[in-house]
């Protein structure tokens, strides 16, 4: 089920609020309902297609090698 525009707007507001509260936070979104393009459109730092991919992306964002 695709996300509607209201959901996307809410995610933008949530990401904006998180960045205001914790400027150095790294934000990932992902899973079946979203895409890398969606992640970019809401201002996320990264996208994970599934939980394993999200962990790898998180490690990369933190400057740590994935797979260790």
Image: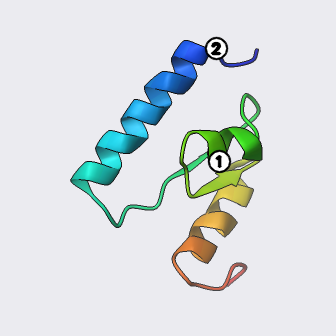
> What percent of the width, then of the height, locates residue 10?
45, 24
Of 9 and 60, which appears nearest the observer?
9
12 lies above or below 3: below
Q: For numbered disc 1, what is the local secondary structure?
A: helix
> Which residue is tagged 1?
40
> Which residue is tagged 2?
4
Q: Identify the residue at horizontal 72%, vertical 79% (top origin).
A: 67
25 lies above or below 20: below
Real-space Cα separation, disc 2 to disc 1, in angstroms:
16 Å
Q: Identify the residue at horizontal 67%, vertical 19% (top origin).
A: 3
> What percent of the width, then of the height, locates residue 9?
49, 24
> What percent of the width, then of the height, locates residue 46?
63, 57
> What percent of the width, then of the height, locates residue 20?
26, 50
Q: Is residue 25 left or right of residue 11?
A: left
- The quarter holding residue 13 reads top left
| Label 2 crowd bin: few (<14), some (14–19), many (20+), radius 10 Å | few
Quadrant where the image shows the N terminus: top right
Q: Sequence-wise, which precedes: disc 2 or disc 1?
A: 2
- The quarter holding residue 37 reads top right
């Amino acid at each position: 089920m695709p996300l509607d525009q209201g959901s996307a707007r809410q995610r933008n507001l949530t990401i904006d609020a998180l960045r205001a509260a914790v400027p150095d936070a790294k934000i990932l979104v992902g899973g079946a309902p979203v895409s890398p393009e969606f992640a970019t459109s809401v201002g996320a730092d990264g996208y994970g297609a599934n939980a394993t991919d999200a962990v790898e992306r998180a490690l990369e964002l933190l400057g740590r090698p994935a797979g260790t």
